Every structure is written in structure tokens, then in C-alpha cells.
Image (cartoon, rainbow, N blue to C red):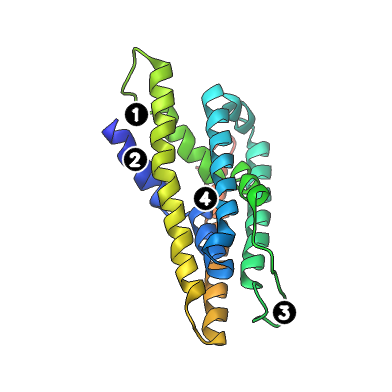
Amino acid sequence: MIAFAAAVFLLIATPGPGVLSCAGVGAAFGFRAGLRYVAGLNLGNNLVIAAVITGLAAVILAAPVVRGVLLAVSACYLAWLALRIAAAGKRLAFGEADRAPGLRDGILLQAVNPKAYVVSTTLFTGFPYAPDSLLFETVTKILIFNAIWLPLHLGWLWAGGVLHRLDLPERAHRRINLAMAAAMIAVVALALFSMGGSTSAEPGGTP
């Protein structure tokens, strides 16, 4: 159980679409405005866990075409969120986004977030500690996962919210929003690169 909890912490703390978008939403719109978004991320992540536990995710992701479509949708959606963060407020000349991403946005992001599926599959198909009671192990894993997931994501949101509250010059706010958006775009690029590598390693591809 301790090994499982440590794995949860390490896998979630690693920067990905969820944590980076939490920080970006906090920096662009503030802590309180981002709470609904974090709630949506949490609900979406638990839906992904349910798909992994029931085997639905394995069936869906078994097809390379489906994985490719999922990644493409994820990349487009993350790019759209990044644009909203970059254009937050009235400081930017090329756009404005006054409404923070909400519950629906968080759910949709996790639904198409490749890292959510990879992490959930790794955690809930590995690290067995109660082989005699699969139900007990599954329920406690879900509880432990959420007990670690929620503070970490709220922490990222809070960190972004601190930047939002600072009385910084307009240029500094612009740079912060653009930096947050750029970090999310970098995650998209890395995801596309890793997807290309995994595709080439499959039968018929170049190792």
C-alpha cells in the first residue's frame, strides 16, 4: 500500500496536462475561479479510473487508430485551453477570455488526456497488496489516489493563484500567462513525439 501511495505521488506530481493547466488557470483567473475546473478534472479522472478498472479503456485503446485520434483531440483541446490562458483578462491585445474553464472543461480534458489513461492503468493493474480481496484493494486504491491527487492539484492551482494576486506590472502578467500557455503547448509537443515513437514500435512499424 505504501509503494502504491508513493507511485501515485510521483506519477501525479510529474508535470502533465492536468497539473500544468491547474497552474495556468490559477495564474490567469485566480484560485477561486479555478475550483470548478479542478472539480471537473477530479471527476473526469475518476471516470477514467472506472474505464480502466472495468476494462473498457483497454478495449478502446487497443486500436492504434483510436489512440491516434485520442491524442489528436487531446492536443487540439490543450492548445485551445492554452490560448484561453494566454488571452486571459484585458492585458493582451490579440484576445480576451474572461470566463475561467469550468467543470465541463475539466471533465473533457481528462477524457482525452493520454497521461490519465497511462497513469490509471499503471496504478490499478499493478502494485497489488490485497490479492485475497480485489474489492478492498480497488476501493482503497481509489481512496488513496484521490487523497493524494486532490491536494496536489489544488496546490498547483494555489501556486498559480498566488501569481494572479500579485500586484505585478502589466508586462509581467502578460509574460506569466504566455509562459503558462507555452508550457502546455510543450506538453502537447512531447505527447505527439512519444506517440510517434510508440506507433513506430508496433508491428509493421520501424523499431
Q: In which quadrant of the rendered image does the N terminus lie?
A: top left
Task: Quote the CA–CA distance across marks 1 and 2.
Answer: 9 Å
Q: Quadrant of residue 122?
A: top left
Task: Quote the CA–CA distance across marks 4 and 3.
Answer: 32 Å
Report x, y in % for residue 160. 48, 66
Q: Residue at x 35, y 47 (%)?
A: 10
- Residue labelled with disc 4: 194
- Residue labelled with disc 1: 127
Task: Quote the CA–CA distance across marks 4 and 2.
Answer: 21 Å
- Residue labelled with disc 2: 7
Q: In the rendered structure, are the residues bearing label 1 and label 2 in contact, judged by CB atoms less than 8 Å apart? A: yes
Task: Quote the CA–CA distance across marks 3 and 2.
Answer: 42 Å
Given the image, on which type of amino acid does mark 3 rest?
A: Phe
Given the image, on which type of amino acid does mark 4 rest?
A: Ser
> Can you tell which of label 1 and label 4 is closer to the viewer?
1
Given the image, on which type of amino acid does mark 1 rest?
A: Phe
Within-10-Å neighbours for mark 1: few <14, some 14–19, many 20+: some
- Residue labelled with disc 3: 94
